[in-house]
Amino acid sequence: MAFGLVSLIPNDAGIPFIRGRLIAFAFSLLMIVGSLTAYAINGINFGIDFTGGIQMEIDTEGPADLAQIREIAGGLNLGAADVQGFGEADKVLIRLQALEGEGLDVEAAQQQARQTLQAALEEQLPGVTILAADVLGAKVSGELQIAGLTAVIVALALMLIYIWFRFEWQYSVGAVLALVHDVIITIGLFAVTQMEFNLSTVAAILTIVGYSMNDTVVVYDRIRENLRKFKKKEIGEVLNLSINDTLSRTILTSFTTLVALFALFAIGGPTLQGFSAAMIFGIVVGTYSSIFVAAPILMITKVNRETSED
Amino acid sequence: MLYFSPWKIFLILAVVLLGVLFSIPNLVPANERFVVRNEQVTDEPRGIWAFPLVPHNSVNLGLDLRGGAHLVFEVNLDEVKEDRLENLAEEASVALRQAPVINVRRPSVVGEEVVVRVARAEDMDAAWDRLQDLSQPVGNNALAQQGGFGAQTVAFTRDDAERIIRLTITPEALEEIQTRTVTQSIEVIRRRIDETGLTEPTIARQGDNRVLVQVPGEANPQRIIELVNTTARMTFHLVDSTVTIDASGQGRTPPGVEIMPTENPGEPFLAVQRRAMVDGENLTNASATAQNGQPVVQFQFDTAGATAFGRATSQNVGRRFAIVLDDVIISAPRIRGPILGGSGIIEGGFTYESANDLAILLNAGALPASLTPVEQRTVTAGLGQDQIRAGTLAVIVGFLAVMIFMLAAYGVFGIFSNLALLVNVTLILGALSGLQASLTLPGIAGIILTIGMAVDANVLIYERIREEARAGRSPANAIETGYSRALSAILDANITTFIAAAVLFMLGAGPVRGFAVTLGIGIITSVFTAFLLSRFMVAIWFKAFKPQKLGF
């Protein structure tokens, strides 16, 4: 009979995670401060979902002349144009900032600007094809900003409540701190790399939140079980044991998820690249935080050992 | 865990079978499943697909994958509100002029209210009472009228010192107007788009005051914008030829007369009476035809329109009247004699296409308010195809990589988890086809993510079994304990991810919603496959081979 051919992680590794918690805390703190600093200095490169404006993906005949396209798009009096290559040599992504002002007149002008840009491109670049175009006015993008922020906050709050309900408040605090940690660092990634932050990035962040929570819950579940099983052991010892117990699962699952996401990153096309990059990064951070942040925090929040709640 | 009750076995097999049944249509081209008429695939199933209860729908691709235009328009409600206030002022004026006449300064709209200034203080009560008739119960339904409860359409306040009565439209009435305006707009847009022959448009209300228009296959949104942007309110006014108008369209107009631009360059402006002789609402039918080789639009009034038009033309033979479309005069013919039949033609220097478009707009009726585009997203079908190809390839590669990995890590148990994964993807496909939820590009990402995460439940269980076996339990016992002890962790973990998916679904828009759908479905199917299906497979294997030792 054939069974497991490889055992990637030694059983009962006994790695002293908890002993290294101060180093981990320091590291996390450094990452958070770094992320916030990067955010303060660079800001976030918000996509048109949140800023409004025009985004157009075009296919030129032969390799694209970015400088020429920049000139055409910038010379329309429609605001600053950002022109960059997109995946292949003949694919170009053009972004125009939102028009200034408010009201339905400006909204209408914003929508009309697409036609102006398209006409200019078609006239000056024979054989050009408009592959895709998104136009959002200030109104819709403002609403999407609020919706995106609300989504993240509501999701965090609901998870906090769920964990509180299933475990105890000490766990809940730890789990949510770990999540906030993940979210801040992921946003830091966007501040450092200046990758475009759009609606699907919010989806990626929420998924990271879900995944990290998933990881944390598995560790917590084991901590609760072990706390009941080993009533005499030091809490730090129990935490360490629980992390080690679940370590092979944590790493296996992260690995399969990363494998799938790398496939998406490598061959899923340029549109999903930012999305998959955010997820890959987030899953690494999320895995780290379940082990090094969520569990050790229970030493600080002083988890109650006496309850028999299941 | 080795024992499965018959109903449980039935349930497991039934779910798997349903998943397979619902996903099969994806393997058969659409033209073999549906009746093809005029080289267009209809939505009428044929052959074995036409049998009742046989699923025949394949996955419904989102616009970003199939190509098309997604447009959101905002209904200009301020305009409707202003119109309503103007009407209210007019109604107030008419009501107060009825005998016995109550002297007031002409009621006027100031901001959000109609202001009536009564001339004599002793008329205040009479004016107040008479104006009350202008208010009706909102919705005008019998229940509200009878009981006297429910909101009124107009609210009144009086200021006796200033001799002023103020009329405002109540919030309830405004809300009703808003709902009605949006609903009517949707109706009109649907009629207009249907007449253009664009296939499968989606036209729906979005939020309070928006209309969503989705047209698959159409990558140039400009045509749709123009179709929706035109209010197409047509009115007929008498021309006042006594007014002299300068080149910039300025001139002294008597009360009730205004200057409007025309489409005729030889006569760029005309003064017309503000009050319409007849309204386009009274049009019943319009069509494009030719007269003396020129394209014209022929129209027909209903009875009320024909009467009004007949009367107006009889009284004004020799004068000109203007045909006004959205505040622009498109034609201003002279009335040669009374037009009593209720039909007429518009000559306006049309091309055949523009005559045809005008007929479409007139037939579909006027929009109750103007609509402004606020969002447009378009993708060509070609790009959609590329994205499907890249996405599918990514799914397959991700799937294979995870399978190989699971096989390497867990051997025979890996086979079970891989079979479960295969069923999982089939179930997702079946659920998407059955529910007809749109699969978007982020949705494909959701499937890939699910593949990665779906094995998590199995990993949790297998790791637990390994552990229990190492702790000295017999294989049967270890498997049993492994499954039961892993349950709480699996449920907690999946519920939290499901919360994230649900929040995304509720707050997200378009493509992101597609991601939430596949993620949500994937979570449900992966719990099912891990907990019931793979366990069932392990049980069968265990009964067949009775292993003495689990070689993890």
Image (cartoon, rainbow, N blue to C red):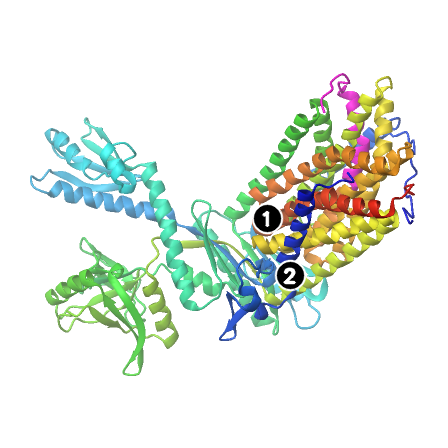
Q: Is residue B181 in view from this perspective? A: yes
Residue B481, x across and y down, in percent: 81, 34
Residue B296, x across and y down, in percent: 30, 75
Counting residues from the start of the chain, the first of labels 2 and 1 encountered is 2
Q: Residue at x 63, y 58 (%)?
A: B21
Q: Nearer the viewer, mark 2 or mark 1?
A: 2
Check if residue A224 falls in the magenta segment: no
Q: Residue at x 26, y 41 (%)?
A: B140
Q: Amino acid at mark 2?
A: Ile
**B122 relative to A242 in the view: left or right:** left
What residue is shown with label 2? B24
Range of magenta residues: A284-310
**A290 relative to A47 in the view: left or right:** right
Out of B452 and A212, give the one closest to the viewer: B452
**B294 relative to A276 in the view: left or right:** left
Chain name for mark 1: B
Check if residue A309 falls in the magenta segment: yes
Q: Is residue A45 in view from this perspective? A: no
Q: Relative to A94, does residue B78 appear above or below in the rendering?
A: above
The disc label shown at residue B513, or none: 1
Chain name for mark 2: B
Residue B333, x across and y down, in percent: 22, 71
Q: Quadrant of the N terminus of chain B?
A: top right
Per the picture, the main secondary structure of the magenta-coloured stretch is helix
The image quadrant of residue A130 is: bottom right
Q: Are marks 2 and 1 in one subunit?
A: yes
Q: Residues within 10 Å of mark 2 (few under 14, many from 20)?
A: some
Q: Residues within 10 Å of mark 1 (few under 14, many from 20)?
A: many
